[in-house]
C-alpha cells in the first residue's frame, strides 16, 4: 500500500510546524529562566554585599573600598556585635516587646472578629468600618499625639507603652482578616454548641478559636515580622538604651565621626535571624493560611 504524495507533504509540514513550536517554547523557557536568575541576583545583591561586608575588617574597607575583593576574612565582627555592641541585649528587648504584643493582638483581635462575624447587633457594621478605617490612617500623623499621651500617662520609655501601641495599631488589620475568615465557619456548629449548654466564651475558646488556627498562624508570622522589625515607634517611645529593641539599638553602633560598618552590618544580620527562623518554622501554616478558600 502506497501513501499518496499529498499526505506525505501534509505530514512533513505538520512535523515542521510542531518542531518550530517546540523550539519556540524551548527558547521562551530559557528566556524566562534567564530573566528569573538575573532578577534574583539583582534582588539578592544587597544581602550578598552585607554578608561580604560583615566578614571584612574596617581597615580593608578603608583601603580598598566597599566593592573590592576581601583581603581578609574574619568572623570577629559577629562576636564583637554580640558582646561589645550589646546586640544580645537588644534582641532580648525585642522578644520582651514582640511576644506580649503578638499574643495580645491575636487574642483581642480574635475575640473582636468572633463578635463581629457571629453576632448581629445595631453597631456591628459601624464598628467594623471603624476597625478598617483605623488600618488606613497614616501612623506618621499620630507620632506626636502618641508621644505626648504616653509621656502624660507615664508610659514613655517603658516596655508597656511600646507593647500597647503595637497592639493598638495591629488590632484593626488582624480583626479584619479573622472576621472574614470566621464568617465562613458553619453556623450550625455554634448553634449545636449553644443547645448543648456551652457559654458564649466557651464557644469562642473551644470551637471558633481552634477552627481559626490556620488563619491565626498566617497572621502571627506577619505580625511577628512587623512588630519585631519596627523602628519608628521604638525610636519615638524608647529613650533608654537598655530598653531599646534591636532595630533602634543598632543605631547606637554608629559613631559620631567614623562608623565601623562591618560591626553594624554584622549586628543587622544577627537581628534578621529570629524572623527568618520563625518564617521557616511556620512556613507551612503561613502558606496554608494564605490559600484558605482557594479552589482547584
Image (cartoon, rainbow, N blue to C red):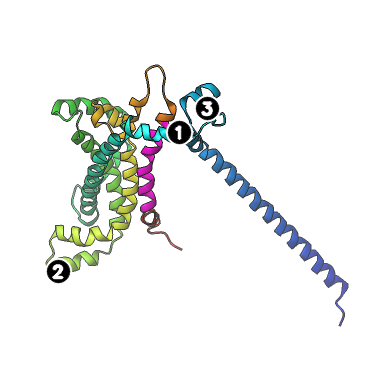
Find disc 2 in the rendering and name its residue: 195
The answer to whether residue 260 is visible is: yes
Asked which secondary structure carries label 2, the reply is helix
What is the CA distance from the residue labelled 2 to the residue labelled 1? 63 Å
Q: CA distance from mark 3 to mark 2?
A: 70 Å
Disc 3 vs disc 1: Cβ atoms closer than 8 Å?
A: no
Residue nearest the observer in this picture, 284 or 124: 284
Q: Residue shown at 65%/48% (left/top)? A: 31
Q: Earlier in the sequence, mark 3 or mark 2?
A: 3
> Over which residues does the magenta segment extend?
265-282
Q: Indicate yes or no whether the magenta region holds residue 275.
A: yes
Nearer to us: label 3 or label 2: 3
Mark carried by residue 240: none
Task: Pick the residue in front: 196 or 266.
Answer: 266
Q: Residue at x 39, y 35 (%)?
A: 78
Between marks 2 and 1 in the image, the one whose residue lies nearer the viewer: 1
251 up-or-down from 113: above or below: above
Residue 150 left/right relative to 65: left
Quarter of the image holding residue 163?
A: top left
Residue bearing the label numbered 3: 66
Nearer-the-camera pick, 30 or 290: 30
Amino acid at each position: 500500500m502506497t501513501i499518496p504524495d499529498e499526505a506525505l507533504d501534509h505530514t512533513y509540514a505538520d512535523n515542521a510546524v510542531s518542531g518550530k513550536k517546540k523550539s519556540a517554547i524551548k527558547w521562551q523557557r530559557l528566556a524566562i529562566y534567564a530573566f528569573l536568575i538575573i532578577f534574583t541576583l539583582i534582588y539578592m545583591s544587597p544581602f550578598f554585599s552585607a554578608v561580604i561586608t560583615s566578614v571584612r575588617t574596617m581597615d580593608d574597607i578603608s583601603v580598598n573600598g566597599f566593592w573590592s575583593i576581601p583581603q581578609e576574612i574574619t568572623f570577629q565582627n559577629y562576636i564583637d556585635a554580640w558582646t561589645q555592641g550589646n546586640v544580645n541585649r537588644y534582641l532580648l528587648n525585642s522578644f520582651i516587646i514582640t511576644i506580649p504584643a503578638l499574643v495580645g493582638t491575636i487574642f483581642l483581635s480574635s475575640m473582636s472578629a468572633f463578635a463581629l462575624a457571629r453576632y448581629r447587633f445595631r453597631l456591628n457594621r459601624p464598628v467594623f468600618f471603624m476597625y478598617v478605617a483605623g488600618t488606613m490612617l497614616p501612623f506618621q500623623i499620630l507620632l506626636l499625639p502618641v508621644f505626648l499621651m504616653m509621656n502624660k500617662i507615664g508610659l514613655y520609655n517603658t516596655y508597656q507603652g511600646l507593647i500597647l501601641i503595637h497592639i493598638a495599631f495591629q488590632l484593626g488589620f488582624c480583626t479584619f482578616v479573622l472576621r472574614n475568615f470566621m464568617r465562613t465557619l458553619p453556623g450550625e456548629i455554634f448553634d449545636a454548641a449553644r443547645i448543648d449548654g456551652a457559654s458564649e466564651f466557651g464557644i469562642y475558646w473551644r470551637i471558633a478559636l481552634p477552627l481559626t488556627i490556620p488563619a491565626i498562624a498566617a497572621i502571627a508570622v506577619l505580625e511577628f515580622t512587623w512588630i519585631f522589625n519596627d523602628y519608628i515607634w521604638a525610636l519615638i517611645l524608647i529613650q533608654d538604651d537598655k530598653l531599646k529593641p534591636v532595630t533602634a539599638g543598632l543605631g547606637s553602633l554608629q559613631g559620631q565621626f567614623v562608623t565601623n560598618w562591618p560591626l553594624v552590618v554584622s549586628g543587622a544580620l544577627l537581628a534578621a535571624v529570629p524572623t527568618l527562623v520563625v518564617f521557616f518554622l511556620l512556613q507551612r501554616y503561613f502558606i496554608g493560611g494564605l490559600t484558605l478558600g482557594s479552589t482547584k
